Structures are given as structure tokens and as C-alpha cells.
Amino acid sequence: MSVFTTIVSQLINGLQTGSVYALIALGYSMVYGIILLLNFAHGDIIMVGAYTAWLFMVNFSQSPIIAVLAAIVASTVLGVVIEKVAYTPLRQAPRLSLLITAIGISFLLENLAQLIFGAGAKPMPKIVNVPSISLGSVSVSGTALVTLVVSVVSMLLLNLLIKRSKMGKAMRAVSEDTGAAQLMGININRTISFTFAVGSALAGIGSVLYSAAYPQASPTMGGMLGLKAFVAAVLGGIGSVPGAVIGGFCIGIAEAGASAVGLSVWKDAVVFIILIIVLIVKPTGLLGRNLQEKV
């Protein structure tokens, strides 16, 4: 295999993984932009989506399409339920209380999954059945193609939702100034719940795409995946939707680059080294902005 073929192959791998990180990072950034919450339970919503798809295909003998839709719906509903049950009562509490609650929800979901499904990983049936294509000397898997196409379409639809729809305008207004948005007649609670629903739906899509590339579901799968998506959100600028997309692709390509030079064992460390560098050099991220609190 030539050097050019290796570079192109690793670039495609990085874009495939990065698109999943970007979808998940969008959930972090949207929620943070609305209520300044780092929702560390977001990664475990991915795990729930993966187990839902596994249940529908293995236990209920449903087609992959039905399983994918079920995973997205389950992730969306779970995200809204978590917001209503765990976060809404603490809306006026210190941010540390919300952060501790998010971590507690994460541990709760992981342990519930371990009790229900066991500690071992469940092999995921084939979700994507698309043949590979050849671009010269480079072979691109069908899974990578579907992942890239679905991710790009999802991001474009999200952009249209935020920029063109009435609820999207409400989300932007609440993100800018909650008090002023409320005075203008915007329902704050409904807007926050809608934001959680959209972010969780994107996590559900990401869980299916990740399970298609790495066909297994485990109780702890959302932990590292969620942390890497969080790093992507910080790199792009936490609270910035375009920044989350850019950060996700950057992290995916960085991981692929580490594997290409023989550092595949250290690719997780590379991600957190990037986080440390960003926090030291540019804490607001690539597209983030400085927030000044009024006193």
C-alpha cells in the first residue's frame, strides 16, 4: 500500500469517526448554550440507543430500519425525561449541583444497563448493508459512506432548524438572554426541553452509526465516547454549533493520524493532550466566545 493510499484511507477513517463525535458534541454544545450545563449523562444516552437497537434486532427480530428508528426515539425520550426529572428541579441551584446530578445520572444509567444486560458486550447485528466502493486504489466501506452522508444531512437539517424555524429562533433567543426571551413571550421550559430532545436525537443517530462501525453494545461504551465528544465540543468552542462540528472532525482526524504513525495504543491520550493544549492556549475554543457574568 502506497503512502498516498494510506493517508487517504486514514483520512476517511478520521472523517467517519469524527462525524460521530460531531453529532454527539452538538448535544453538549446545544445544552450548554441554553442553560450552561455540561450534561455528562449525554454519553450514556448513546449507550441506551445502542442497546435499544440491539434489543429490536435480536430479541424482537425487527429490521435494522425499525431498530434505528426505535434507538432514536428511545434516546430522545430519555433525554427529555432526564431534563424534566433531574435538571428542571435544580434550575435555580448552583451549577455545581447540576454538574454533580449529571454525573450521578451517568452512573445510574451505566449500572442499570449492567444489571439488565450484564457486564459483557453484546454483539450487534449488521446495521448497514451497503457495498464498498473503490476510489482508485482506495477502498471506502459502505459503513463509512453511510456514516458521512447521514452525519452531513443531520447537521444540515439541524442548521436549518436553528436558523429557519420558530423554535430554532426561540433557542437562539434563550441562549443569548433568558430573561429577555421570557419577556418576549418565549416559553423557556418548552424551549429547553426541545433542545434536550434534539440533542438526544442526534446522540441516538450517533449511537447507531457508531454501532455500525464497531458492532457491539456495552454498559460503559458511552463513557469514553462521550468524553471524546466533550473534548470536540471544547475544541470547537463549547456552546457553538459550528464549533462542535469542526471539533468533532478534528478529533476524529487526530485519532486516525495517531493510528497511521503507529500510535494507535496512544490515540485516546492524544485526544486528552489536545484538550489540555486547548485549555492552556485558547480556553474558549476555536469558535467560542468569552462570557462575562454580571455582578
Image (tube, rainbow, N blue to C red):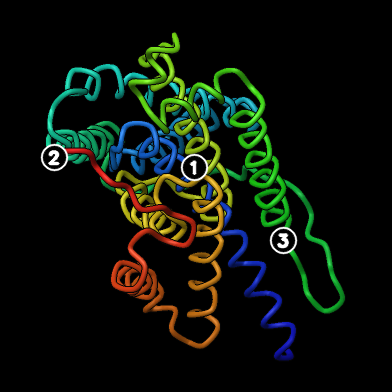
**Which residue corresponds to mark 2?**
96
Tell me if 127 is positioned left or right of 234 in this view.
right
The residue mark sitting in front, 3 or 2, is 2
Q: Which mark is residue 141?
A: 3
Q: Nearer the viewer, residue 247 or 290?
A: 290
Tell me if 280 is positioned left or right of 154 in this view.
left
- Crowding at label 1, few (<14), some or many (≥20) Cα neighbours within 10 Å? many
**Which residue corresponds to mark 1?**
207
Which image quadrant is residue 174 in? top left
- Crowding at label 3, few (<14), some or many (≥20) Cα neighbours within 10 Å? some
Can you say whether 9 is above or below 104 in the image?
Answer: below
- Crowding at label 2, few (<14), some or many (≥20) Cα neighbours within 10 Å? few
Which residue ends up furthest to the front in the rendered image? 295
Name the residue at 48% across, 80% down: 258
Gap between marks 2 and 1, in whole Å?
28 Å
Name the residue at 51% across, 55% down: 214
Label 3 sits on what residue type?
A: Ser
Name the residue at 24% across, 42% down: 293
Question: Residue 39 at x, y = what percent?
Answer: 30, 39
The residue mark sitting in front, 2 or 1, is 2
Question: Residue 57 at x, y = what percent?
Answer: 55, 31
Label 1 sits on what residue type?
A: Ser
**Marks 3 and 2 in Cβ contact (< 8 Å):** no
